[in-house]
Image (cartoon, helix red, strand yellow):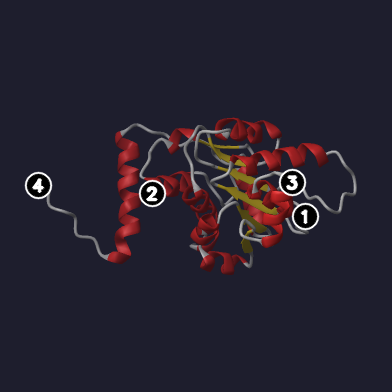
């Protein structure tokens, strides 16, 4: 039996990333999705690697895709006082609070909000869909971090297409960035493709894979590039 590798607790993360780098080279995997603006301090490679670190799944090197302006937009949002809205409390819990504090921003989840629950029941919608409508009324730019509910992505898309051409709509604000990584089978793939075709800035995990942990990992990877210098 192969002896285990002794690693100090504080070195586990860095050693994990070394292994990921070694595996990427061994498998001949080249990470894609570079920022359109090469001067942007946020890059795609740390996002890929943190998602792989979170999932131990190298498929994300292929299925994680970025809109041309996604990373530049992420930098602008994270340094100008945005808010982050998730579709699960699990994703919210996974977002690093220290990094949020350093950037002076907040993260929210409305899934357990009593008014959201009541409205979703009255309208026959999912709480995730109503939560995204609630997020669209923020008077700050919003990063949507969606890792569980395709109905949340569909809600973001439909609300955007309904209001994108309206002028002076104080009750709706266009999403700043959509992180679309719900996991599952029903409507997951079509919902992700809708966001890709919407014209909105996005980071999407194509196919069925994803999850709340992946959504949180992407948010953290973006923030760490600004807070761990």
Q: Is residue 69 visible?
A: no
Secondary structure of the residue carrying tag 3 is: helix
Front in this rendered view, residue 154 or 99 = 154
Residue located beneath label 1 in the image:
137
> Which dot, 3 or 2, sits closer to the camera?
3
Q: Position of residue 225 (x, y in %)?
A: 52, 56
Under tag 2, what secondary structure? helix
Please tell me whether mark 4 or mark 3 is closer to you in this view.
3
The answer to whether the residues at label 4 and label 1 have Cβ atoms under 8 Å apart is no
Q: Along the horizontal axis of the image, is 210 left or right of 2? A: right
Q: Sequence-wise, which precedes: disc 2 or disc 1?
A: 2
Q: Upstream in the sequence, badge 4 or badge 1?
A: 4
Distance of label 4 from label 3 (alpha carbons) = 59 Å
Front tag of 1 and 3: 3
Report the residue marked by disc 2. 53
Between the residue at mark 3 and the residue at mark 2, the CA separation in whole angstroms equals 39 Å
Q: Nearer the viewer, mark 2 or mark 1?
A: 1
Residue neighbourhood size for the residue with mark 3, other residues' Cα within 10 Å, grouped as few (<14), some (14–19), many (≥20): few
Q: Element type at marker 4?
A: loop
Give the CA distance from mark 4 to mark 1.
58 Å
**How many discs mark residues in the rendered view?**
4
Q: In the rendered structure, are the residues bearing label 1 and label 3 in contact, judged by CB atoms less than 8 Å apart? A: no
Local crowd size for mark 4, using a 10 Å CA cut-off: few (<14), some (14–19), many (≥20): few
Mark 4 lies on residue = 1
> Alpha-carbon distance for marks 2 and 1?
34 Å
Residue drawn at the location 47% of the way across and 37% of the way down? 209
Few, some or many residues within 10 Å of mark 1 (<14, 14–19, 20+): some
């Amino acid at each position: 039996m192969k002896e285990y590798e002794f690693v100090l607790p504080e070195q586990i993360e860095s050693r994990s990333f070394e292994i990921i780098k070694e595996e990427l080279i061994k498998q001949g995997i080249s990470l894609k999705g570079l920022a359109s603006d090469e001067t942007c301090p946020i890059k795609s490679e740390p996002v890929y690697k943190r998602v792989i670190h979170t999932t131990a799944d190298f498929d994300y090197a292929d299925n994680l895709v970025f809109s041309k302006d996604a990373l530049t937009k992420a930098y602008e949002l994270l340094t100008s006082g945005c808010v982050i809205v998730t579709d699960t409390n699990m994703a919210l819990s996974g977002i690093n609070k220290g990094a949020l504090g350093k950037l002076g921003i907040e993260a929210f989840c409305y899934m357990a909000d009593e008014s959201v629950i009541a409205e979703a029941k009255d309208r026959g919608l999912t709480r995730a869909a109503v939560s995204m409508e609630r997020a669209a009324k923020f008077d700050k730019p919003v990063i949507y971090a969606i890792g569980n509910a395709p109905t949340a992505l569909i809600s973001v898309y439909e609300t955007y297409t309904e209001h994108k051409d309206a002028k002076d709509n104080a009750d709706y604000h266009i999403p700043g960035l959509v992180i679309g990584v719900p996991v599952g089978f029903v409507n997951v793939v079509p919902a992700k493709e809708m966001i890709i075709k919407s014209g909105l800035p996005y980071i999407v995990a194509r196919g069925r894979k994803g999850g709340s942990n992946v959504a949180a990992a992407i948010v953290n990877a973006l923030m760490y590039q600004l807070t761990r210098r």
